[in-house]
Image (cartoon, rainbow, N blue to C red):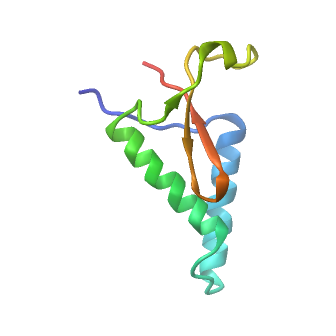
Amino acid sequence: MKPVRITFIDEAAEEWKHLNKIVVEERSKGIGNSENQQLLKSIKQRMELIKIDPQYGAPVSKKLIPKELPVDNLWVVDLTGYWRMLYTLRV
């Protein structure tokens, strides 16, 4: 089985960095449990599940994938706090 690598691109990469920065700042202030920390934990958990099974999420119908997105497959997973994460699989 080929190892799975998860990469954030474009806006997702910036938001990932920003969320991590916020969580580090919160923890340095002694905040032990916040919505940001729960969201980060939820994303990390789903990333581990995707590494185990890349098709973990629910597939999005090809006709629902916006034409502007340069992808031919799209998956969605639910996160904490009614957030969702979209991802695509590339070889």
Q: Is residue 82 left or right of residue 3?
A: right
62 horizontally vs 48: left or right: right
Q: Look at 63% across and 35% down and name the residue there.
A: 9
Extreme residue toward the bottom, this view = 30
Q: Residue furthest left?
A: 1
Q: Nearer the viewer, residue 49 or 29?
A: 49
Q: Position of residue 12 (x, y in %)?
A: 67, 41
Q: Is residue 75 above or below residue 15?
A: above
**Image spot of residue 52 (x, y percent):** 32, 40
Compared with 43, 89 (above or below) is above
For residue 31, side relative to residue 77 (left or right): right
Residue 88 is situated, as x and y percent measured from the top left of the image, at 54, 27
The residue at the far right in this view is 68
Q: Quadrant of the C terminus?
A: top left
**What residue lies at 53% left-to-right and 52% top-to-bottom?**
43
Number of numbered discs present? 0
The front one of 11 and 50 is 50
Q: Which residue is nearer to you in this view: 85 or 27?
A: 85
Image position of 62 with respect to 77: above or below: above
| Residue positioned 23% across, 27% down in the render | 1
Examine the rendered structure and indicate whether residue 67 appears above or below residue 56: above
Q: Residue at x 65, y 64 (%)?
A: 21
Residue 41 locus on image (x, y percent): 51, 61
Q: Is residue 44 left or right of residue 54?
A: right
